[in-house]
Image (cartoon, rainbow, N blue to C red):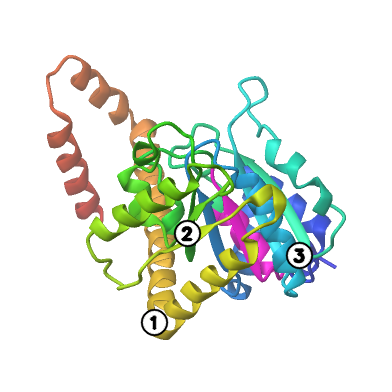
Amino acid sequence: MGIVDRLLQGDRRAAARVMRWVEDDLPEARQVLKAIYPHCGRAYVIGITGPPGGGKSTLVDQLIEALCNRGKTVGVVAIDPTSPFSGGAILGDRIRMQRHSGDERVFVKSLATRGHLGGLSKSTDDIIQVMDAMGKDVILVETVGVGQDEVDIVKTADTTVVVTVPGLGDDIQSIKAGVLEIGDVFVVNKGDRPDADRTQRDLEIMLEMSAPRPDNWKPKIVRTVAYKGEGIEDLLNAIWEHREFLEETGCLEMHRREKEERLFVKLLSDHLVNQVLGRMKQNGRYDKYMEALVKHKQDPYSIVEKINCRCQEAE
């Protein structure tokens, strides 16, 4: 039995091998991704993001258990910072979720950012496809601690959960504008702290002041104490409420169409750029252009226009 067939039957070893190929950007990965594509698109993707120190990993750990109790199979993509020594992921998330390692319903994969901005890893979407193909019902994607402009998770997740906690200094500043705009569900974690009421109140005011969303969804706010398992069912109910809203309004189908369009455009862009650069380096034009740019004999805008004209003539 080939590795694709094993993967489609949920074989964990096959999945782990394919994910390694994806991370290493090997040609074998592309062949598998082609083969499994018709079997993807069934899993529901939930993004977990927010400032560092919010307890995202503990929350994900509790969500895994709650989802399994509801009869769901779960994939977890835990994005970790890159180790400065090995270049791999610092496996803090996998250590926290170790209690689920023997559960056949759960598959946890840690990914290193490897310098990729936006709170995700370059291979995140492909890893999600692999987990989808192996039959996971729900895929949780935990980002690294994000800032104002690191909001790539909204392009990947069907529902985005933004986690914050009281006591991060200025609570308003801890929830940056860019992150505020992407949240479908907001979690005030460590909700047993004395200043949790203030944090929740600040969130409510900020959301009231925000412009109406294009889809008319009103984000929910949930209070949790993740290390005690408190509020997890309320959080899942809020996520499921958002899912039902997306399905009823047709927004889920629209979102997934946009996701496929982004994938197509990215792949096409990468292919065309690599093709053009390869030809230029082969015929020596690339070095000539670089020399002209360094000496300011030509500007990059004119060079790109010239290359575009040559590509059109070649057609």
Marks 2 & 3, CB-CB < 8 Å contact: no
**Distance between the alpha carbons at the discs numbered 2 and 1:** 17 Å
**Distance between the alpha carbons at the discs numbered 3 and 1:** 31 Å
Q: Position of residue 85 (x, y in %)?
A: 65, 20
Rate crowding at label 1 as few (under 14), some (14 to 19) or many (20 or more) other CA atoms within 10 Å: few
Check disc 1 and give the amino acid type.
Gly
- In the rendered image, the vertical position of residue 260 relative to residue 119, given as above or below: below
Give the farthest residue toward the top.
295
Depth-wise, is mark 3 or mark 1 nearer the camera? 1
Marks 3 & 1, CB-CB < 8 Å contact: no
Q: Position of residue 144 (x, y in %)?
A: 54, 40
- In what element is the residue under mark 3? helix
- Residue 250 disc label: 1
Precedes in sequence: disc 2 or disc 3:
3
Marks 2 & 1, CB-CB < 8 Å contact: no
Q: Which residues are magenta?
A: 125-143
Precedes in sequence: disc 3 or disc 1:
3
- In what element is the residue under mark 2? strand
Residue 25 appearing in the image: no
Check disc 3 and give the amino acid type.
Leu
Residue 164 appearing in the image: yes
- Residue 160 disc label: 2
